Amino acid sequence: MVKEGDSIPSVDLFEDSPGNKINLSKELSSGKGVIIGVPAAFSPSCSEQHIPGYIGSDKLKEAGKVFVVSVNDAFVMKAWAKDLDSSKVSGIRFLADPTGEFTRALDAEFDATPLLGNKRSKRYAVETENGKVKKVAIEPDPAGVTVSSAEKFLS
C-alpha cells in the first residue's frame, strides 16, 4: 500500500484523450500536490460527495496541483470533469488510468468486478511534496467517504 516517503510512480495517465499523456511523477516532481483516487467516475459517492467536496473547498488552492485519478478511459474522465466542474474554476485535473497501471503501482487496486466489471482503485487522497508522498488517507470501504474527504484531508 502507498505510504509516506514513497515516490510518485512514473506511469502515463491520460487527460481528455488517449493521445494526451500526463505523468504525475513529472507533474509533481516539485512543489505541493494532491492525488485523489476514486473507484468510478459518475458513481454516486464519487460524483455527489467526494469530488464536489474538493471542488468547493476553500483550502484547495493551498494544496498545490490537484488531480483526480480513476480506472476509466480518457473520454469518460473528460465528460466527468465537464459535468462536475464545467468552468474549470477549481483547477482540478481529471486523469484516466485505463489499464489500472498507476493504481497498481500505488498498491491501491481492489476487485470491483461484481459491481463495476473490473478491478478499480480504492478511494484515497495522497498529499505530495517534491515528488514524494507526504500524507496518505485510504478509505477502509471504497464506497465510503470519510478519511479521504476534502473536509478531513485538507484540514
Image (spheres, helix red, strand yellow):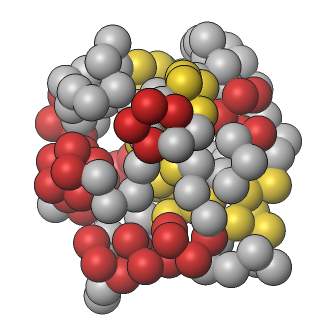
* Residue drawn where x is 52% and y is 33% of the image: 113
Looking at the picture, how far across and down is residue 51, in whole percent? 28, 53
56 left or right of 130? left
**Residue lying at 71% horizontally and 28% vertically, measured from the top left:** 104
Observer-nearest of 108 and 91? 108
Q: Give x and y (percent) for residue 22.
A: 74, 63
Q: Is residue 110 left or right of residue 38?
A: right
Where does residue 26 sit, x and y in percent of width and height? 79, 52
Question: In the rendered view of the protein, which quadrant contains the N terminus?
Answer: top right
Q: Residue lying farthest front?
A: 114
Residue 13 in view here: yes
Q: Position of residue 121 (x, y in %)?
A: 52, 34
* Quarter-of-image position of residue 92: bottom left
Based on the displayed image, in which of its 4 quarters is residue 107 positioned?
top right
At 57% from the left and 57% from the top, the residue drawn is 72
Say which of 43 and 53 sits in front.
43
Q: Residue at x 22, y 27 (%)?
A: 144
From what the image shows, is residue 55 above or below residue 36? below
